[in-house]
Amino acid sequence: MTAQPPLPIAIEEGAVPLGSAVSLVEDADGGRVFLHGQLVYAWDDGDTPTRRFAAAKLADIRAASVADIAAGFGIDPGTLWLWRRDLKASGVAALVPDKRGPRGASKLTRTLISDIKGRRARGDSFRTIAAAVDLSTFSVQRALSADADTDEGTETPAAPAARTAPVDGTSAVDGTAGAADPGPREVRLPVLPDPVDRSRERAAARAGLLECAAPAFASAARVPLAGLFLALPALETTGLLGCSREVFGALAPGFYGLETILTGAVFAALAGEPRAEGATRIDPVALGRVLGLDRAPEVKTLRRKTAALAGTGKAGDLLTLMAAQHLNGSDDEGGDLAAVLYVDGHVRAYQGRKKIGKVHSTRLKFPVPATEETWVADAAGAPVLVVMAEPGAALTGELRRLLPALRTIIGDGRRVLVGFDRGGWSPALFQHMAGKGFDVLTWRKGTTKDIDASHFAEVTHTDGHGETRTWTAADTAVEVPVGTTGEVFAMRQISRTVNVPGGGSRQIHILTTDTGLPAGEVIHKMGARWRQENYFRYARMRFSLDSHDAYASTDDDAERSVPNPAKRKAYQRVLAAKARYDKAEADTDAALLAARTPAPGTAAVLITNTEHNAITADLIAAETALEQAQAAHQEIPARLPLGKIAPGQQVLETETKLLSHAIRMAAFNTASTLAREVRTNTGYARAGHEAHALVRQALTGSGDIDPSRDGYLTIRLDPLPTQRATAAIAELCDHLTATETRYPGTDRILRFEIKNRAASPKN
């Protein structure tokens, strides 16, 4: 039997779908609800109780989700919950809206409006004017926006109640209050009004007459992504905006200025879209409201503006200046951020079609076309500086190259502990760093004699979070050879015994030139180097660390000296020939010994030249092959110009990537700062494990924008899904408000609040 096709969702044109089964039609005649195409509810225009009854019953029978029903009827889910509760408790009569009393004549006469406008022109604030004329601040705002031809004694039209929301979180749909108690303020913000008209500024920008559009905020409720305002105090401490102004000055005249482009890029990264292409997945109007504009820049605008900044060749200067500001501050424990630095190389794999040099990736376990980067992080693993490594450069060479830049950034002669992995092993480098005022912290490479068990003792260390760890370690002094001349360099060695898979144990050794740190702190700081690896992993997942933000490339230097791969192959042939020679020598010795040993009952043995030559033939052949392989290896040059080995090899553009690194480093450090504030300045019980997750949730939340108070920009966030999360963000809002951070490009001080959440019977 052929199955009957499903009924259509709606039978009238223009119906609004509520989920997959219900549709709603509302027009001048009233409203109608269809369930699988069948009419189930209908009401006349103005019949509010029946309309509310239909919405409540749809939710009761689960014809659609509460969110879909509330959105279709233009109400909040909390209002729908109230309707269902009242219907169940008292029937349809409870859904009749309260009768409003007669409205008297408006106080906003033409004379009073003129007086208010005159006071505003003299610079009085809304609150001062309201107190002087005995009106609310909302009435003052209405008077300032009223038409000049308002008749004296007539009523001033008010905004429709269905499109406004009170600032304290109550609902104003259909004239009913929401779940939360109204606050003392009378100002009601319009729900998502049209952004401030910027058409004149856009026209001026197209004509080249506008340097940049300044942020301008309109009162609005339920603004998506309003939580991103929370990032601004922490973003200010990263130095991205201030250092960019110092390095780049300003962009070419246009609608979007330097601060808008950079702030928008950080906001997009914190919202989960760190690449320019992510602008297509974020509502431009929603992000524009947070930026104080009518809409956020598009992908092509972002690429054009970023290319203009990269074209200056100053991305490295920006990173250096940001690093200096970062390292010259103090951490939350009052310590010196520059006291410990971690340096590590990072391989950024390339998947395109260009001919890019191959680099061994420790993460992927094989050589891949890639670009190498050298990263510097502080003691907490937060990124401080990144430079593009020379193609094929080793970490030892990169460390030598970085030392002058680090000394310039730090700015004085204080000693700095620099930690790195075994890739930087070089006693000559250790000696060089010690002479430049840098202490070394690294693992010992290669095999070495175990430390006697009598030298081991228990050592402890208490970190900044108050957690104490205990190890069994030996603290000794060693001398490592520098080159082949017999020179040695004295270092301190901290040894530990660790278990190995399959049973047993082995000793691992930490080398340092710092003789003042306790042994427990040395072990802790060496283990903390993995925080930098954690950043690489986190940034790959959250901030597209390895993305290709620019697809341009240039030809590599054809005259650059590179290792000759033929030399390595020839050396492998030498090793193979040496192995064959060693085997032939052992076999020949065994054969000669057997030939010289007389048989039982025989007193003498006679070996002819022919027999001797036969026994040693394989050895002579192996010796000849070894000599030929060694001679061939000696004739091959160790290095050649790149053009002879890999003609046409290219390198990826670096300035755009460095600029994107600066933006994403600022985004990461911003999120980390907010997470630290949650841990230290709120009572959130799970802050040690969930601080970052809570921050991500808060940053993408909605809220109200209230610029009504002169000199201030109030951000009033909607409550989070749980009471404990809401309470934590409320404490964070108080702490961020105390910083008195100004919105970039304006003189408005940010104030943060969170709306009240009424107690629910289920809570």
Image (cartoon, rainbow, N blue to C red):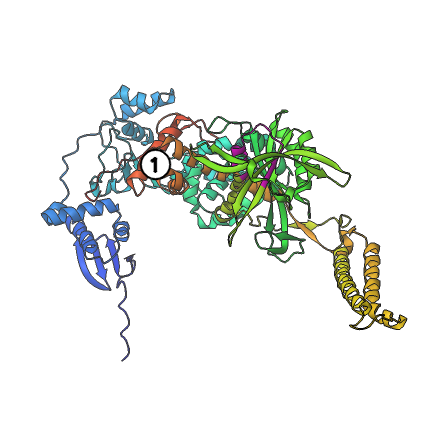
Which residue is at 53% across, 42% downward? 530
| Total tally of numbered discs in the picture | 1
User: Where is residue 178 drawn, in percent x and y?
Assistant: 22, 40
| Observer-nearest of 515 and 5 | 515
Q: Is residue 337 left or right of residue 399?
A: left
Q: Which residue is mark 1?
A: 684
| Mark 1: amino acid | Tyr
Q: Residue at x 25, y 33 (%)?
A: 156
Task: Check residue 618 for magenta coloring.
Answer: no
State whether residue 58 is above or below residue 85: below
| Front-most of residues 590 and 455 | 590
Residue, far bottom: 1
Mark 1 secondary-structure assignment = loop
Q: Is residue 322 visible?
A: no
* Span highlighted in magenta in the image: 509-526
Residue under the image location 16 percent in, 47 percent down:
85
